[in-house]
Amino acid sequence: MKAIVLEQVEGQTQATIKQADLPAAAAGEVLVDVAWSSLNYKDALAITGKGKIIRNFPMVPGIDFAGVVKHSNDARYTAGQEVVLTGWGVGENHWGGLAEQAQVKSDWLVPLPAGMSSRSAMIIGTAGLTAMLCVMALEDAGITPESGEVVVTGASGGVGSTAVALLHALGYKVAAVTGRESTHDYLLKLGASRIMPRSEFAETRPLEKQIWAGVIDTVGGNVLAKVLAQTNYSGCVAACGLAGGFDLPTTVMPFILRNVRLQGVDSVNAPFARRTAAWARLANDLPESFYQTATTEIALEDAPKVAADFLNNAIQGRTLVKIR
Ligand code: NDP
């Protein structure tokens, strides 16, 4: 099969497009012909070697894929069935989706939701699934469109873009925090009602004026500290990312004086029931316009170059990778 193969050469990660043979199948694994994959922030860290994502080389990256089952020993999956995979360490410590085929545990797969194409599933990808899990976290905390304004940070990235589009479609008033003026029109088109420059989130006091009923934060660091201090009494902050750093320079004040909930969101090990619920919601709630507005389609051969652009904050929306 054709694949991106990552190898270590003199301590540096090297990404090459080449023919590779899948490792021997383990019990309970399903062979999938991959149709589409995507690039996420974590893929960019893995492919460029800028993050310690991969420990065993050679490795095929790609933390998500969608395609058709070629061969299965598990009765739940049959040849010809369309499936989607995100997370579980695929593309990190198990050969991933940036290849013509993938062989994964059947428990890691999700049947493609009714009415969704495999292309749409990879426009959503890990980033979009995470955005949906964040929206569900706000709902679980009782945040409704009537509760007030919701803010999304890192708004023009993959998670952020999907979160803005989903929240808008669900009737929320959405503010978008972005570091780039060039993305303003794009974010308004996705459904943001106002844009706030990231530079306004550099410093914070322990408590600030209450503005947000809910927050979806993809950035961490000072930005997360500031939105926590601005969250309304009994509001909820769903934190899923670290594009701006993994630290959190905050105080306990929002929690003990304003009853604020800080809800972590992980998509990698999300249980099957939560995943399938999120995919069903995505099939239903994400407007058709999102797919046109947020997608850049590239070929497998372009993935290493585009991965570098991610870490220069030069990517907008979702990057779809056509495999076959
Ligand atoms: P993208 O690269 O697509 O988007 C990240 C966005 O963050 C950028 O578009 C930019 O938005 C903003 N940003 C970039 N650099 C900085 C910086 N130095 N300081 C502040 N903001 C910055 O990544 P994804 O959307 O794929 O992922 C976003 C984050 O979520 C990543 O940290 C990723 O690891 C994490 N993630 C977590 C998951 C989980 O399961 N918990 C799953 C998927 C992603 P703008 O230009 O608009 O400011």
Image (spheres, grey):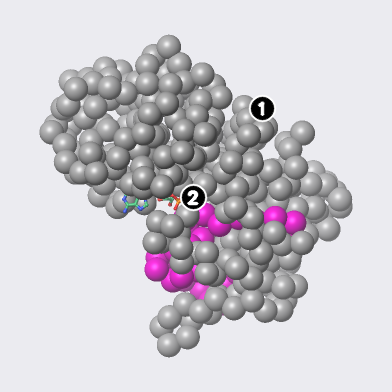
Measure the C-alpha gap from mark 2 to mark 1. 24 Å
Q: Position of residue 149 (x, y in %)?
A: 37, 21
Q: Nearer the viewer, mark 2 or mark 1?
A: 2
Specify the amino acid type for callout 1: Asn
Residue extending furthest toward the bottom: 10
Q: Which residue is mark 2?
A: 316
Task: Check disc 2 and report its element: helix, strand or loop.
Answer: loop
Tell me where the magenta segment starts and ends, as one range: 34-60
Q: Which residue is mark 1?
A: 284
Is 244 situated left or right of 320 in this image?
Answer: left
Is 134 situated left or right of 91 in this image?
Answer: left
At horizontal 60% and vertical 75% (from top left) the residue drawn is 5
Name the residue nearer the viewer: 175 or 107.
175
Sequence-first disc among 2 and 1: 1
At horizontal 19% and vertical 22% (from top left) the residue drawn is 209
* Picture quadrant where residue 251 is located: top left
Look at the picture and state if 65 lies above or below 22. above
